[in-house]
Amino acid sequence: MTTTEQTAAAAGASATEAFRASMQGSAADVPAERISAAARAVLDGVHSAIREHGLTYPEFQAAKQWLIEVGEAGEWPLFLDVFVEHAVEEVASKQWNGSQGTILGPYYLPDQPRLPASAALPMRAEEPGTPMVFTGQVRDVTGTPIAGAELDIWQADGAGDYSGFAAGVPDGNLRGVVVTGEDGRFEVRTMRPAPYQIPTDGPTGKLIAAADWHAWRPAHVHLIVRAEGHRPITTQLYFDDDKWLDSDVASATKPELVLSPSKQQDGSLRAEYDFELEPAR
Ligand code: MBD
Ligand code: FE
């Protein structure tokens, strides 16, 4: 194994571990009829792809080999969140009001430090990248500010790497839970993240390269915004000048989720975004 292969496998194994931990005893109890309908539809889709494209035995065996490798590399969370989760979110969000959400992705870690309404995310003394202030307000659907709302934030660094998943980034880097003040406002000092590239050395990256697709997500900041008595919103915010905004490999951008940061005198960025939470149902 080369060093880079170890990197993709380590990220995959960590993502699988994080997913397992998040699932502690909470697997949905899906009735047999629904499993049957869903499994039937997925298999029908596979069969029609085979018939439509006249797929051969060597191609079938190559696919089998690839599927085995995805599991061995721990990349099921990565693959499913990149290529499938957006459809689940689309279906779920049809019944939701309030600010737009989008996919969670594989790199959320719970239990990060709680920070005051005006705070810097934990970062290295010489954190590389462009400093960015991210500010706004959390309100309910009637426009009333919500005090004590949590913005659970995580993002890649200026090199596109996530703490907890990339070697060389300290644990907890650019992760934190910011709590709004009495006026529902927050002001977070962070760094502009870089675009994220799916690891090119793992099976997901190999599929993308073999299909001649690109492996990029536009730069983004992840958030779960929650407040007592309200439905939490899982979302991501993007940047209006991003090269990959219209071709996200994970199909998870929405026009409502794009920041337009303004450049300050000192070269830093300032971006504003307000969140609207609907009542919990
Ligand atoms: C990411 O950073 C991400 O947000 C998603 C959805 C998938 C892979 C990597
Ligand atoms: Fe991400």
Image: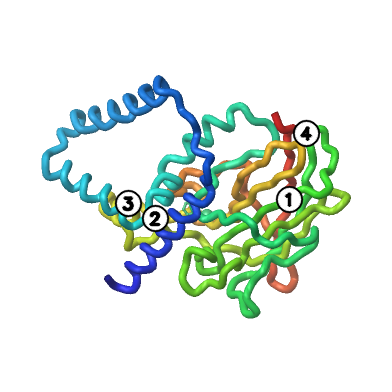
Which part of the image, by quadrant, shows the N terminus? bottom left
Q: Residues under labels 4 and 1: Cα distance?
A: 17 Å
Colour convention = rainbow
Q: Residues under labels 2 and 4: Cα distance?
A: 37 Å
* Residue beneath disc 4: 141
Rendered location of residue 159, percent (x, y)? 51, 69
* Residue beneath disc 1: 150
Q: Which of disc 1 and disc 4 is earlier in sequence? A: 4
Q: Is residue 140 left or right of residue 41?
A: right
Residue type indicated by callout 4: Val
Residue at x 31% of width, y 55% of height: 72
Between marks 2 and 4 in the image, the one whose residue lies nearer the viewer: 4
Numbered circles on residues, count: 4
Q: Does dot 2 land on a helix, a strand or a loop?
A: loop
Residue at x 44% of width, y 24% of height: 31
**Labelled pair 3, 4 in contact (Cβ < 8 Å):** no
Q: Is residue 142 left or right of residue 248?
A: right
Residue type indicated by callout 2: Ala
Q: Residues under labels 3 and 4: Cα distance?
A: 42 Å
Residue type indicated by callout 1: Glu
**Labelled pair 3, 2 in contact (Cβ < 8 Å):** no
- Residue 4 falls in which quadrant of the image? bottom left
* Residue beneath disc 2: 215
Query: Most extreme residue toward the left, as rendered?
Result: 57
